[in-house]
Image: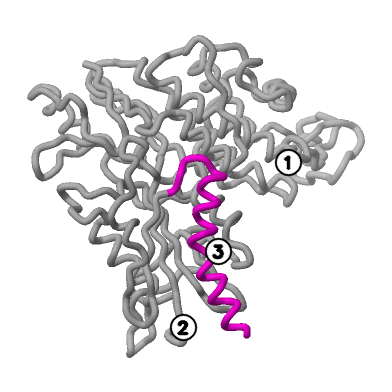
Amino acid sequence: MRLVARDCSPLAPQPTAAEAAWLRRLAINARATDHVVPISGERDEDEPVVYCAWDGTWWAGRYVGSLSFEGHSLTIEPRFGLATLRNWLFEATSVVVTDAPGKPREDESFIAQLLASVWTHGFIEAARHGLPALRRDVATWGPTIRGRLDVPASLRLIAAGGGQVVSIRSERSLDHAASDAIVAAYGVLRRWLGVPDEQWMPARAKELIPNLMAVTGARPRVPTKAELDRIRYTPITAGFAPIAELSRQIANRRGLAADIDASGETRGVLLDVAELWEMYVLSVLRRAAGPLTVTHGTREKAATRKMLLSDVTGQGLGTLIPDAILHAGGQVHGVVDAKYKSLHPSASAPNGPQREDLYQMAAYLGRFVSAASRLSWGVLAYPVDPARPSSPQAEHLSPWSLDGGRKVVFTSLPHVASDAINKLRALVAPMVSDESDSRA
């Protein structure tokens, strides 16, 4: 069987009894963390790939991609369409995702396109100053010393009647695990797309890959994570660390839904759309928030706080990590959290926002905003749903007030960056006005 769903949506039509039984087994065996290829390196806690809700309805989670299991497959497509993901990805990373000529493998082509675009962008950025030629010790044999003398090895060679000495010299080389991972990922992406390199690889990437392949060969062994972690990068080559890890993950997920077998192993690749939405929101927020400074809570660990502090030891309990903090002059004016969810009312959230998200924002404002602040804002940012163009009630009635001058705003952001920036500027304006008043 081949099931097709859309992320964060109920399956339509709902599965038959046999399909539901298979989905239950898939849900048990498929852990998102084993199949998700990260884009930014920072993601929220994983959720089920598919799940059965309290009312018996089957839903797809927040991931897109294809999984195969027991000879059957599940493909999860983006609910807002591939064009929307292209917009988000371009805004967050400047990566341009082009249409795949001829729809190489139809139902999973979108995941291959996204992965290939993220990979080529990362590779080119890392290679801005050249390929990762790293220093390593090379031993040579000869009548003269070149480099430093390897005394023990030379004595053994002389004792054996060799009449030569062993020298050790340091030289730059592309022969290491990072190169193997990059070339292995290139081979996998090339097979997935099924089109000539000219149609998906930028000229710079096409120029660099043959230099690596001359060292690694066309089919290098995929290195382990431990092997990549042992590489000592220089400040100039440090940018290759994340692309090498991304390459390893791509190379280790060789099976897409088209490669179905009857084994009990779950195969496939997923992308976390919630991660991409967070990246998009952070990007447009930075362009809209001036003169306030935007700090990314997920990446900048100094921005994290503990929800509770022990009166006895001062030890913290419960880490709070908002997506973004808006501040100026050492004072926090707002906290922003991206939610890849629906803001419209549903059976599980009759008022629109989910209860845990309300508690989370209240905790953020209580911990990150000083009690002396005259006014502070919490913003929960959701994607606009084109299928439901009306403004959600929670957004229409915003702002909502907590105690102590704290206010919460719910907003649904457009998928086009320029429109999202204009909407966020209007939301940030009261925070900027508050900052100006505090200086006066």
Q: Point out residue 275 in the picture as x, y percentages from the top left corner.
A: 44, 46
Q: Is residue 368 left or right of residue 91?
A: left
Q: Count the numbered circles shown.
A: 3
Q: CA distance from mark 3 to mark 2?
A: 21 Å
* Number of residues whose C-alpha sits closer than 10 Å to that of mark 1, classed few (under 14), some (14–19) or many (20 or more): some
Q: Which residue is mark 1?
A: 134
Which one is nearer the viewer's eye here, 158 or 301?
A: 301
Task: Verify whether residue 87 appears in magenta.
Answer: no
Quadrant location of the N terminus in the rendered image? top left
Q: Earlier in the sequence, mark 3 or mark 2?
A: 3
Q: Point out residue 102 in the picture as x, y percentages from the top left corner.
A: 50, 9
For residue 52, what is the image quadrant?
top left
Q: Residue at x 83, y 45 (%)?
A: 149
Which one is nearer the viewer's eye here, 157 or 273?
A: 273
**Where residue 374 is drawn, which disc sits there?**
2
Q: Which residue is mark 3?
A: 295
Range covered by the magenta-colored residues: 413-440
User: What amino acid type should be assigned to the residue bearing mark 1?
Assistant: Leu
Q: Nearer the viewer, mark 1 or mark 3?
A: 3
Secondary structure beneath disc 2? loop
User: What amino acid type should be assigned to the residue bearing mark 2?
Assistant: Arg
Q: Is residue 67 left or right of residue 110?
A: left
